[in-house]
Image (cartoon, rainbow, N blue to C red):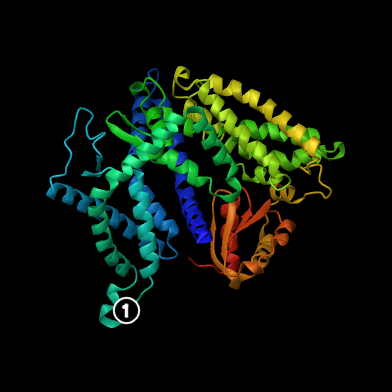
């Protein structure tokens, strides 16, 4: 049961990952549009910025629909175009039935001075419905994907053929959406109270709450379950709810994007930003660790260590993708990984205590672009950068002392030269490695599903006893992890390309 639960959570987080990458682009474009609208900009430029901002606002204000379609599509095993269509129709049906029930039962809330904010209801695509935020898209997307996978391949003969396949999945969704749309009018208010209580608990926990969040978010990276910590706080009501310029936003990232798009409507950065600073360790912590690895490496190996680690360090600091770097030392010493997590928690807590309200969930590029449109008096980015410089030194000292005292076999100190990462950054030819991956997971017949997340190729296998992790060490991959029947091969930034090659080589069809 535990392995099944972890498998489901991993599948959900993988599906969410693809959607979140689109939101990263949205945040960047919002920042650029806000800069174009600054007072000193010429009128035509400001008008152009306004058009772009309106486009991104449409996305930001309808994330629930995007999550519903995105999750259904990525979780559907096949017929993904049909799955997207069923998801869109199901979302619209939910809005209609939920609004109709609230209306028939005289349960519609009356708008106040702040509209429907705080009433438990909201306007979505012209319908006044129960305010579920992006949870509606997440829940409905998962349900639709489940139903679609169950019924989309069921075919009927002759005159009933039109009712089979994807149409059958749609037909099944009609009563499901009806029950869900009516049920949430009674259930969701209680759920909202639970979410509010969780938010208040994290708020009341103060700095310790920030520490626990930051530590867990970093420490769980090897399991892939860290997505289940930061995603809810960044994109759902767990991270907080606020009204800005007549619209309601929930989740730390969404709230910051809205503040960035409406700088004149805010006098302070919302406190939810404390859940959106975990890019800090991706830049400053990684740099300190990198310097420590160079310092503690054998003199004759230092140049090799620099060339081996520099590409992954650059990607971590600029883009916020740390896994290729993390797995360089994770297995060399779990204690070093524990220290990495503790330092992450301590410094994010320190940032909050010192008053920094700087947003950074990816890398330095994301941090600069997203904070630039806002007044430095609001973001306190100077505090963020000063603490960052200090953090580099602390990470360097702590890692250096631990490596020497415990004689850890970190890059440049191991008995056998680690050639994989160097190859990964110097070659784009994965064809030979793909064949090794296939053998490592027990052959084509042992494969159940093939997917990828930010940096990992994820393969579900039928018989995990046929998996041979040692074969992966002979390839360009940084490492591998086996969780239940899920094999994760650490690729890095080229994972999407490698995943497509892997699917082609295995003849995989979704």
Along the viewing direction, whichever of 116 and 215 lies nearer the viewer: 215
Q: Is residue 488 left or right of residue 207?
A: right
Residue 67 visible, this orientation = yes
- Residue 217 vs 459, above or below: the answer is above
Point 57% across, 68% down: residue:
447
The crowding category of the residue bearing disc 1, from other C-alpha atoms within 10 Å (few below 14, some 14 to 19, many at least 20), is few
Point 25% across, 80% down: residue:
159
Residue 46, image x and y in percent? 36, 25
Question: In which image quadrant can residue 316 be found?
Answer: top right
Residue at numbered disc 1: 156
Residue 363, image x and y in percent? 56, 35
**SS at badge 1:** loop
Question: In which image quadrant can residue 268 be found?
Answer: top left
Along the viewing direction, whichever of 376 and 372 lies nearer the viewer: 376
Q: Is residue 435 left or right of residue 414?
A: left
Point 34% across, 30% down: residue:
50
Residue 59 visible, this orientation = no
Residue 138, image x and y in percent? 38, 50
* Farthest right residue in view: 300
Q: Is residue 260 left or right of residue 293?
A: left
Q: Is residue 501 left or right of residue 35?
A: right
- Residue 370 vs 190, above or below: the answer is above
Residue 180, image x and y in percent? 27, 55
């Amino acid at each position: 049961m535990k392995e099944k639960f972890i498998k489901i959570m991993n599948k959900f987080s993988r599906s969410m990952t693809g959607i979140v990458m689109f939101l990263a682009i949205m945040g960047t474009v919002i920042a650029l549009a806000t800069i174009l609208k600054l007072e000193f900009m010429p009128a035509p430029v400001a008008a152009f910025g306004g058009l772009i901002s309106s486009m991104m606002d449409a996305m930001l204000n309808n994330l629930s629909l995007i999550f519903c379609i995105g999750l259904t599509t990525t979780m559907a095993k096949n017929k993904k175009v049909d799955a997207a269509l069923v998801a869109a129709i199901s979302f619209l049906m939910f809005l209609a039935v939920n609004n109709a029930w609230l209306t028939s039962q005289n349960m519609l809330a009356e708008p106040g001075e702040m509209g429907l904010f705080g009433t438990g209801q909201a306007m979505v695509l012209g319908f006044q419905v129960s305010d579920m935020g992006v949870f509606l898209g997440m829940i409905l997307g998962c349900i639709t994907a489940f139903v679609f996978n169950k019924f989309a391949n069921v075919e009927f003969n002759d005159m009933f053929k039109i009712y089979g396949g994807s149409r059958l999945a749609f037909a099944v969704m009609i009563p499901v959406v009806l029950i869900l749309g009516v049920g949430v009018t009674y259930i969701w208010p209680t759920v909202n109270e639970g979410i509010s209580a969780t938010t208040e608990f994290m708020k009341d926990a103060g700095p310790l709450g920030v520490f626990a969040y930051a530590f867990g978010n970093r420490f769980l990276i090897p399991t892939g379950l860290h997505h289940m910590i930061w995603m809810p706080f960044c994109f759902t009501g767990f991270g907080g709810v606020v009204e800005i310029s007549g619209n309601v936003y929930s989740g730390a990232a969404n709230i910051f994007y809205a503040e960035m798009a409406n700088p004149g409507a805010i006098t302070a950065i919302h406190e939810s930003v404390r859940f959106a600073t975990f890019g800090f360790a991706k830049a400053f912590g990684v740099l300190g660790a990198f310097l420590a690895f160079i310092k503690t490496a054998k003199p004759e190996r230092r140049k090799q260590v620099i060339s081996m680690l520099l590409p992954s360090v650059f990607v971590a600091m600029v883009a916020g993708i740390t896994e290729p770097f993390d797995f360089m030392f994770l297995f060399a010493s779990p204690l070093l990984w524990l220290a990495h997590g503790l330092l992450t928690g301590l410094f994010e807590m320190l940032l909050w205590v010192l008053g920094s309200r700087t947003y950074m969930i990816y890398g330095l590029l994301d941090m600069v672009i997203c904070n630039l449109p806002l007044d430095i008096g609001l973001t306190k980015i100077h505090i963020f950068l000063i603490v960052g410089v200090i953090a580099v030194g602390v990470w360097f000292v702590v890692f250096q002392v631990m490596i020497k005292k415990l004689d850890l076999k970190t890059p440049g100190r191991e008995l056998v030269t680690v050639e994989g990462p160097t190859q990964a950054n110097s070659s784009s030819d994965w064809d030979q490695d793909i064949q090794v991956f296939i053998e490592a997971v027990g052959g084509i017949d042992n494969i159940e599903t093939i997917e990828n997340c930010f940096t990992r190729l994820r393969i579900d296998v039928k018989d995990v006893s046929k998996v041979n992790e040692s074969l992966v060490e002979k390839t360009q991959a940084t490492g591998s992890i086996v969780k239940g029947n899920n094999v994760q091969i650490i690729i890095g930034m080229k994972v999407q390309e490698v995943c497509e090659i892997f699917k082609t080589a295995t003849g995989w069809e979704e």
